[in-house]
Image (cartoon, rainbow, N blue to C red):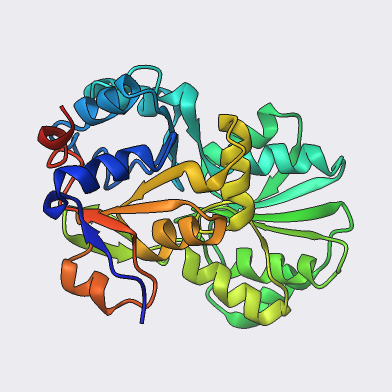
Amino acid sequence: MGIESKHLLDLSVEDLHKFLDSFDHVLSDCDGVIWTQDSLPRVGEFFKQMKKRGKTVNFVSNNSLRSRANYEAQFKAASIDNGFESLIIPSIAVAEYLKSVTFNKTVYCVTCTETKRVLEAHGFKCKEGPDLGPEYYGEYIQYLEDDEEIGAVVFDSDFKINLPKMYRAITYLKRPEVLFINGATDRMVPMKTGLLGLGTGVFTDLVTVEVKREPVLLGKPGRVFGEFAMKRAGITDPSRVLFIGDMIAQDVSLGKAVGFNTLLVLTNTTKEEMLSHTIRPDYYAASLGSIVPLIQ
């Protein structure tokens, strides 16, 4: 049985003060917490209240698909200042990780366009594709040829993934020296409020089984990603962090892996679904906007 999750709106005044005093830093997910297709009500007010109370505020997302301009527009629409400057996403984490290990070969990208662009902007040579494969399976033998130039395989939100890409990734990863890195791990992604669709994490799972190797997780819920987010935000004590998310598998699991306090908003998870999980948040609420009247 998991911990007992506390509904923030049911806390007494004394317990609410204890909750607010239990953390110094806020790390918040974006999709499903701050916005779905549009900004969710009063989210900007919530983060302003956090800063007013002396909390640092930073943002974490598994979504490397968005451009900087798109993120900036989303934060602006939510009335959040300098949101992108306080944002940690997998593409940035992957680039920083490759720098930390002095990587000097070529990256095979099974990623979205933005992740490849970020890696190239950081000076890394990348290969990708193909976007289309032949109809006859016998022709797939061409994708089983190794390329000694490849020194890392990176998966991150490639919604155009296909069998040729998976064949190539598996072939390269049979060499143990080739780095195996995964950004977004989402098996499900929010399409709109209350509607989830299949995510790209299932394809990385298939490759993981085939090559019998675990990737370095530089997206939620990977502990390395959580520690990277802390470092970027200048946080040293995970127990003084409140991590806010809308998904148990990605967000609450990340919080538990790193040692954060966790708050789940029920944008894409019902209370019944939350209670059925062995991994449970410390706190939950319908939305960030619903908390604002309590903390003003």
Residue 69 in sight from this viewpoint: yes
Judged left or right of residue 227, residue 47 is: left
Residue 243 is situated, as x and y percent measured from the top left of the image, at: 41, 47
Residue 234 is situated, as x and y percent measured from the top left of the image, at: 60, 30
Quadrant for the C terminus, please: top left
- Of residue 31 and residue 281, the one placed in the foreground of this image is 281
Quadrant for the N terminus, please: bottom left
Please, which residue is most extreme toward the front here?
14
Say which quarter of the image contains residue 59.
top left
Tell me what residue is drawn at x 34 percent, y 41 percent: 30
Say which quarter of the image contains residue 269.
bottom left
Judged left or right of residue 199, residue 236 is: right
Judged left or right of residue 247, residue 152 is: right
Residue 101 drawn above or below residue 132:
above
Residue 64 in sight from this viewpoint: no
Number of disc labels: 0
Tell me what residue is drawn at x 84 percent, y 43 percent: 103
Residue 202 is situated, as x and y percent measured from the top left of the image, at: 48, 71
Please, which residue is most extreme toward the top here?
81
Tell me what residue is drawn at x 34 percent, y 17 percent: 81
Residue 248 drawn above or below residue 35:
below
- Of residue 109 and residue 41, the one placed in the foreground of this image is 41
Say which quarter of the image contains residue 146.
bottom right
- Of residue 175 and residue 32, the one placed in the foreground of this image is 32
- Of residue 33 and residue 215, the one placed in the foreground of this image is 33
Residue 268 is situated, as x and y percent measured from the top left of the image, at: 22, 59
